[in-house]
C-alpha cells in the first residue's frame, strides 16, 4: 500500500492565517468563518509562497497529473470534449460551508459561482451546479455538454429531485430556497444538454475543482 503524501495547507482568510501542516489544523481555521480561503500544497515552500500571493491566483489550479490507468484503458476513454463546461462544489464539513461553480472546460474561465452557503453538503452543491449549468446553457442556446464528477448529483438531476437527508432549518433556509428553485426548474423545463461523468482517474481533477483538499 502506497504511503499517503504529506500536504501543507495555506489559509489566506480564516480564524488564523498561515501555513498549516495537517488538514485538522487547517479545518479549525476555516470552520464557522465566513469567506474562508484555503488550499492544499505538496510542499511547505509552495504553501509559503502561495501565502504571500493572491488566493485568486491559485483557486482551481490543477497539479501535474499522471494517470495510473493502463494505456489501453486511457485510449478507450479518450480525451475530454472541450465543447463543454465543468461544474464542481466544495464543502468544509458535512454539513458545512458550501459553494459551487462552473467553468469553461478548456480555458477554465469561471462562468458562475455561488456561495458560500451555511450548512450545505457537497452533494447538494454538485446538484445545484449542474442545474445552474443547464439553465445557463439553455438561456444561451448552447450545444455544450456538462461535465460533473458526481454520480449522485447526476442521479438527482435525472430524477428531478434533490434526495438529500439534510434537514431544513433557519440557518440553511437560503440554500434550500435555491434547491426548491432548482427542482422547480427541472420540472418545468426541457433541455437537450448532455450531462457526462468526468473521468477523474484518466484526466485528473475536474477543471472546476476548488483545489483545496
Image (tube, grey):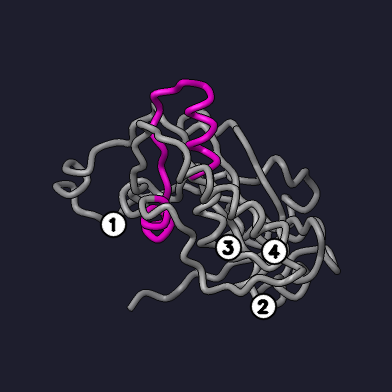
Depth order, front residue of 24/21:
24
- Sequence order check: which comes first, mark 1 or mark 2? 2
Q: Quadrant of the C terminus?
A: bottom right
- Tell how many labels: 4
Could you say where residue 181 lies in the image, as x and y percent from the top left?
60, 48
Give the spatial CA distance, label 1 vs label 4.
Answer: 32 Å
Question: Magenta stretch: residue 136 in it?
Answer: yes
Q: Position of residue 103 (x, y in %)?
A: 54, 36
Marks 2 and 4, the one that precedes in the sequence: 2
Residue at image position (61%, 58%) is 212
From the image, tell me which residue sits under label 1.
68
User: Residue drawn 64% across and 59% down?
Assistant: 176
* Local SS, label 2: helix
Question: Which residue is label 2 attached to?
Answer: 24
Q: Is residue 148 left or right of residue 18?
A: left
Does residue 127 lie above or below 84 as drawn?
below
Residue under numbered circle 4:
97
Q: Nearer the viewer, residue 3 or 102?
A: 102
Taking 112 as reference, is 74 left or right? Answer: left
Q: Looking at the image, is mark 3 or mark 4 nearer the viewer?
A: 4
Q: Which region shows up in magenta?
A: 131-157
Amino acid at each position: 500500500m502506497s504511503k499517503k503524501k504529506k500536504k501543507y495547507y495555506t489559509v489566506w482568510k480564516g480564524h488564523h492565517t498561515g501555513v498549516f501542516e495537517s488538514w485538522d489544523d487547517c479545518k479549525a481555521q476555516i470552520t464557522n468563518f465566513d469567506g474562508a480561503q484555503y488550499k492544499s500544497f505538496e510542499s511547505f515552500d509552495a504553501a509559503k509562497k502561495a501565502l504571500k500571493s493572491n488566493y485568486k491566483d491559485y483557486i482551481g489550479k490543477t497539479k501535474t497529473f499522471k494517470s495510473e490507468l493502463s494505456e489501453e484503458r486511457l485510449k478507450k476513454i479518450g480525451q475530454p470534449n472541450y465543447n463543454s463546461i465543468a461544474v464542481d462544489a466544495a464543502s468544509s464539513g458535512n454539513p458545512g460551508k458550501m459553494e459551487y461553480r462552473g467553468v469553461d472546460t478548456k480555458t477554465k474561465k469561471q462562468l458562475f459561482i455561488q456561495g458560500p452557503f451555511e450548512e450545505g453538503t457537497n452533494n447538494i452543491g454538485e446538484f445545484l451546479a449542474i442545474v445552474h449549468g443547464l439553465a445557463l446553457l439553455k438561456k444561451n442556446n448552447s450545444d455544450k455538454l456538462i461535465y460533473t464528477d458526481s454520480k449522485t448529483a447526476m442521479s438527482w438531476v435525472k430524477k428531478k429531485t434533490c434526495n438529500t437527508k439534510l434537514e431544513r432549518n433557519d440557518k440553511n433556509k437560503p440554500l434550500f430556497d435555491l434547491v426548491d428553485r432548482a427542482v422547480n426548474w427541472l420540472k418545468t423545463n426541457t433541455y437537450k444538454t448532455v450531462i457526462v461523468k468526468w473521468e477523474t482517474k484518466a484526466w485528473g481533477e475536474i477543471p472546476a475543482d476548488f483545489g483545496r483538499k
